[in-house]
Image: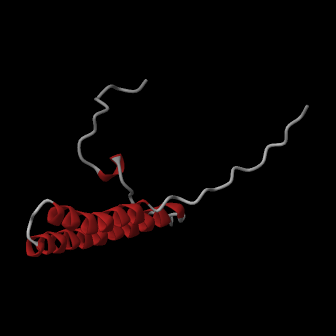
Amino acid sequence: MSQTRTAPQKHPEPDTTGDVVRWAAFCCVLVPVVLVWYGISPAAAISAALGLVTVTAACRALLRQSERGAAQLRAEESTPHRVCHGRTGRGAHRGGRHTGGNTPVD
């Protein structure tokens, strides 16, 4: 029996940043409710909620910026690099100390 292989299908990457932000928003609602339930004043619970919202917004901004940077890096890696002939590239051609030793060649 011969089996035909099909090309692997690309699955979309999960939106982990969105998941984190959704959980953080849920916690921003849940924490003040729990605080009021346990006897903390509503003003203190609202203050805690505002603090959590601020931290969540800052983390969301940092996560989105990190995603954009990673996407840009992937895009740069997938594009072919331009070759400049006649110039010295990176590595041993730039001078400096060489670690090969001073053994004569026969």
Q: Nearer the viewer, residue 17 or 43?
A: 43
**Residue at 46% over, 65% down:** 76
The quarter of the displayed image where residue 90 is located:
bottom left
Give the percent coordinates (x, y) of residue 58: 23, 71
For the rendered model, the colour scheme is secondary structure
**Residue at 19% over, 73% down:** 54
**Residue at 27% over, 63% down:** 27
In this picture, residue 84 sits left or right of residue 91: right
- The C terminus lies in which quarter of the figure? top left
In this picture, residue 97 sits left or right of residue 11: left
The answer, for residue 84, to whether it is visible in the render is: no
Give the percent coordinates (x, y) of residue 19: 40, 62
- The N terminus lies in which quarter of the figure? top right
In this picture, residue 49 sits left or right of residue 70: left
The quarter of the displayed image where residue 4 is located:
top right
The answer, for residue 37, to whether it is visible in the render is: yes
Q: Is residue 52 above or below residue 106?
A: below
Count of numbered marks:
0
Give the percent coordinates (x, y) of residue 34: 20, 61
Q: Is residue 50 above or below residue 22?
A: below
Q: Is residue 11 above or below residue 79?
A: above
The quarter of the displayed image where residue 70 is located:
bottom left
